[in-house]
Amino acid sequence: MRSNDFDLLVIGGGPAGMMAAIRAAESGVRVLLVEKGDQLGRKLLITGKGRCNITNTKSWGEFSTHIHPSASPLRMAFRHFSNSDTIDFFNSIGLATVVERGDRVFPESQKAKSVLNALEKRMKTLKVEILLSAEVKSLRFEDDRVVTLVERDGIGLENYLSRNVIVATGGLSYPQTGSTGDGYRFAEMAGHKIERCFPSLTALMPQNYNEELQGISLKNVGINLFIDSNLISVDSGDLDFTDGGIEGPLGFRVSRKAVKALDNGGKVEISIDLKPALSLKVLDARIERELTALKLYPHKIDKNQLRRLLKELMPVSLINPFMESNKSLSIKNLSASLKDWRFKIVSYVGYRRAVVTAGGVSTDEIVVKSMQSKKEPRLFFAGEVINLDGDTGGYNLQIAFSTGSLAGASAAQQILKSI
Ligand SMILES: Cc1cc2nc3c(=O)[nH]c(=O)nc-3n(C[C@H](O)[C@H](O)[C@H](O)COP(=O)(O)OP(=O)(O)OC[C@H]3O[C@@H](n4cnc5c(N)ncnc54)[C@H](O)[C@@H]3O)c2cc1C
């Protein structure tokens, strides 16, 4: 075998590509992993705010409700390499894990770097060859091999030969980590259809966004999403107001539907319920009690007195922006306003700061039991490049690990059969 000649070439050194390379090398094939960045796993390192939420322990029944646009193309990959396989795998390569709130799994070290280190060590043991600062430019499929054109820093263009190739180039989000949509181009070259991409798990920008809101985090609030005035979803949890608008776990949970609707020209509104545990009636009674305690009379309350009352009902930092956006606030409509603080959403931050890309290589054209292309038998796909995305909570990395493992194992099996 020439030095540029491999059994399998994996494009992309993210979690999907690394897992694919490991699985294939475990089967005994010679693997080259090509990564355009100067290090592997740049996005992996920023996952879970640097702590890396590896997976989620929910059973498939519940897990699958967090996968979009449909979980069925993931079912076989998940069966092949499930969330518990992910935990066992990492434990077996020396990475201890812990389960936290919401069934989310993290490394015990609380450091994404230790996840990357464990994967790198495993690849080294298995003698996976790695090219860094090497950008795949194009793929050419011949009868018995794939010719991959790679541009290497300081070296120039080189051709690499392999029997099979796995595209694990990620999506379009956080392009500074290397995911710039190259895989869609490679898929299109092989005749694949790309489902329209849009950023998911991103901040939603309200109309006339009050800068005073920036930096405020709300715990246990409710959120209702309205599209074209129809109530689409009801949820509760924690929400952050940032420079990008409404985000945090709760904001992210509604962002997929909101972004899609905005892109389609829909009218999007978010209603925040500051008191989700109290009905209007119970909240009215609570307000009465607060008024009595403050010795205030509801029929002759002025703005300053209203402020004093609000101090008992919300964080102080929220009072100004709340009063600003509820200009006709009075004792009469106070409870309704607390339970239905409306924000008209006019835009979103986008790929620059989206956790994940929705859309991608159509799953209709991928054999779901092997991750092999239906268009080109030497081509396989893994990870975010595929039209699969998950909610926050470890679902996206599990997509990467399940599809990466399946693509690596199937691509290797096909090679071994043909030798
Ligand atoms: C801020 C943030 C936090 C997140 N936190 C979590 C979390 O805690 N849990 C979770 O489950 N998910 C999380 N995610 C999502 C998760 O990181 C991604 O879904 C996952 O990394 C996708 O893996 P991937 O291997 O498919 O793609 P990527 O991780 O994007 O890797 C693709 C790789 O391919 C390389 N590449 C691209 N084109 C080429 C080319 N032409 N030649 C060579 N190399 C190329 C890129 O440089 C990149 O390294 C987070 C995402 C972000 C942005």
Image (spheres, grey):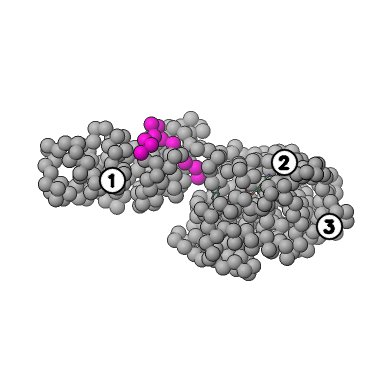
The reply to whether residue 363 is visible in this rendering is no
Q: What residue is pinned by disc 2?
A: 186
Q: Disc 3, ligand 1: is the CB inside 8 Å?
A: no
Task: State which quadrant residue 155 falls in.
Answer: top right
Q: Secondary structure at mark 1?
A: helix
For the residue pair 360 and 356, the one nearer the viewer reads as 356
Q: Residues within 10 Å of mark 2 (few under 14, many from 20)?
A: some
Magenta range is 200-212
Which residue is at a point 36% across and 52% down the rendered structure image? 219
Which residue is at a point 70% across and 38% down the rendered structure image? 185
For the residue pair 67 and 290, the one nearer the viewer reads as 290
Disc 1 and disc 3: Cα gap in Å?
69 Å
User: Is-magenta flag for residue 24?
Assistant: no
Q: Disc 2, ligand 1: is the CB inside 8 Å?
A: yes
Q: Secondary structure at mark 2?
A: helix
Amino acid, disc 3 = Ser
Tell me whether circle 1 and circle 2 mark residues in contact (CB < 8 Å).
Answer: no
Q: What residue is pinned by disc 3?
A: 418
Q: Quadrant of the C terminus?
A: bottom right
Amino acid, disc 2 = Phe
Closer to viewer: mark 1 or mark 3: 1
**In the picture provided, is 106 more to the left or to the right than 292?**
right
Which residue is at a point 76% across and 57% down the rendered structure image? 129
Q: What residue is pinned by disc 1?
A: 316
Disc 1 and disc 2: Cα gap in Å?
53 Å
Q: Where is residue 83? Give x, y as percent.
A: 57, 61
Q: Where is residue 168? Give x, y as percent.
A: 68, 49
